[in-house]
Image (tube, rainbow, N blue to C red):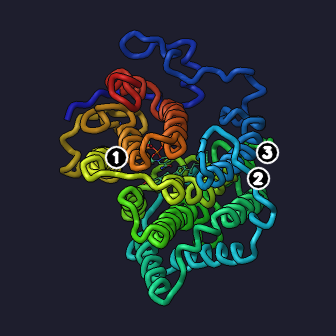
Amino acid sequence: MRCVRAPPGTGAGHRGRIRHRVHLGVGVEGVPLADFCEPPPPGGAETMAPQGSRAPLEFGGPLGAAALMLLLPATMFHLLLVARSGPARLLGLPPHLPAPEALWSPGALLLWLTWLGLQAAFYLLPAHKMAEGQELKDKSRLRYPINGFQALVLTALLVGLGVSAGLPLGMLTEMLLPLAWVATLTAFIFSLLLYLKALMAPASALAPGGNSGNPVYDFFLGRELNPRFGSFDCKYFCELRPGLIGWVLINLALLVQEAELLGSPSLAMWLVNGFQLLYVGDALWHEEAVLTTMDITHDGFGFMLAFGDLAWVPFTYSLQAQFLLYHPQPLELPTASVICLVNAVGYYIFRGANSQKNTFRKNPSDPRVAGLETISTATGKQLLVSGWWGMVRHPNYLGDLIMALAWSLPCGVSHLLPYFYLLYFTALLVHREARDEQQCLQKYGLAWHEYCRRVPYRIVPYIY
Ligand SMILES: NC(=O)C1=CN([C@@H]2O[C@H](COP(=O)(O)OP(=O)(O)OC[C@H]3O[C@@H](n4cnc5c(N)ncnc54)[C@H](OP(=O)(O)O)[C@@H]3O)[C@@H](O)[C@H]2O)C=CC1
Ligand SMILES: CC(C)CCC[C@@H](C)[C@H]1CC=C2C3=C(CC[C@@]21C)[C@@]1(C)CC[C@H](O)C(C)(C)[C@@H]1CC3
């Protein structure tokens, strides 16, 4: 194993020194360190968090957060409405705005609350394993139940039983608008409760980002890192259960409805359902890996994640299947085979990269990763510079994007609407990658600089 050691004093816990060195130091290979360190935010002190915290504001600060809180739900409803409209134009106006009674239904509220309750009950069932999260500011580690896949299987059994007893699953497709509405309301109310709960939390429990002192910004980003009621972890629960499992359930309902309308589900609908079920099943099978994502380790739990997890994921990520129900697309077997290949390549890269990093983070001496080249950092952690992580700095994003393409292709090329996910996801991952780079630069200083030199491309080799 070949290692390059970065000079000491450049890693986590030395943030102030790194910033100071920006003006003084020269990085490795004679490149000024300033080129690689976080530039001062535009507007200087106004855009920095007050109260001594140096976390720069993200997402355009309070104005950006306020705009996103309006724009995201509006986009979600726009997509739900245009998917069922004849022209299905992503950029056009929906044919009509829904009447209030199309949005509000006590039945939808009851169904939604039952769904959340059911998933919470599955979460509380005994787990085959309890995993430890990353070390927190106070040096403690939280414990998390690993029973997400079990929740998926139990949900499938329950739905299977219901359908064989005559439950009209296809009817769910008629309730998407009111369900999306109650999910959005729940996200707002839940985020408000979390914001208030955080007022009583100790400083060590707060997230690095969402504590600027501006209520709009903090409400959006989330103040507390891991809000819990007893052992029930709200963010971990929401990230993987009601939204992700809800997404595949909505897809299934759309498939059933299509079968009722056309006699059998279309090949395109099968592919979209199969690909996305694989993605969700994979996420729950590898549930423990979510504990190292920036959502869990860095971001607070506020409106962004509450809305993202509970409303955005199930109602927007099922867009391709929604589109197909109202706009059936012919798909020949040879084309379907090529699309399956594209999804398989994406999944291979996504899973390979994520598993390689997780294995390495758990145990760098594991024989599967022990032969890989690494860079040592002043924090004691190492960075992989060969294998998947030597190809680009975010190979997992590349695989995810290839899969996103495969999910849209069964919908044909006559409409832009089913490609919304690919467009949104590209923007999300480019922004996320930039956020992660900033965090890694703060954690690893010169070692990260060296990694960027050795692996110059971010997501797509030779392109970006
Ligand atoms: N479908 C969706 O809507 C979304 C899906 N995703 C997917 O979620 C998954 C997780 O993404 P995300 O949490 O953003 O980030 P990553 O899983 O890419 O994790 C980034 C972290 O990995 C570590 N790391 C970076 N480079 C190296 C290296 N060379 N060697 C070892 N460790 C390294 C660093 O943390 P440290 O060093 O501290 O371990 C860094 O902060 C991805 O597959 C992504 O595609 C993400 C967002 C949305
Ligand atoms: C709507 C806003 C602009 C942003 C909301 C973002 C969220 C929807 C996503 C943030 C990170 C996510 C992850 C997954 C789903 C989407 C959100 C919540 C993930 C659970 C999907 C499945 C993957 O295998 C994963 C790696 C477990 C993902 C983790 C991040």
The quadrant where ligand 1 appears is top left
Viewer-closest of 261 and 410: 261
Question: Is residue 222 among what the camera can see?
Answer: no
Q: Which element carries disc 2, helix, strand or loop?
A: loop
- For residue 97, the mark is 2
Q: Residue at x 51, y 87 (%)?
A: 166
Gap between marks 2 and 1 measured at Cα? 39 Å
| Label 1 neighbour load within 10 Å: few <14, some 14-19, many 20+ | many
**Total count of labels:** 3
Q: Which of the 4 image quarters holds residue 287?
A: bottom left
- For residue 191, the mark is none
Q: Which element carries disc 3, helix, strand or loop?
A: helix
Q: Residue at x 63, y 78 (%)?
A: 114
Q: Which residue is mark 1?
A: 350
In the rendered image, the vertical position of residue 36 relative to residue 313, given as above or below: above
Q: Which of the 4 image quarters holds residue 236?
A: bottom right
Q: Is mark 2 within 8 Å of ligand 2?
A: no
Q: Amino acid at mark 2?
A: Leu
Q: Nearer the viewer, mark 2 or mark 1?
A: 2
Q: Residue at x 37, y 41 (%)?
A: 402
Which x, y percent locates residue 254? 50, 65
Gap between marks 2 and 3 measured at Cα? 28 Å
Label 1 vs 3, first from the N-terminus = 3
Residue 363 relative to residue 209: left or right: left
Q: Is mark 1 within 8 Å of ligand 1?
A: yes
Q: Which residue is mark 3?
A: 216
Which x, y percent locates residue 27? 43, 16
Viewer-closest of 345 and 291: 345
Label 2 vs 3, first from the N-terminus = 2
Which x, y percent locates residue 251? 48, 64
Question: Is residue 18 among what the camera can see?
Answer: yes
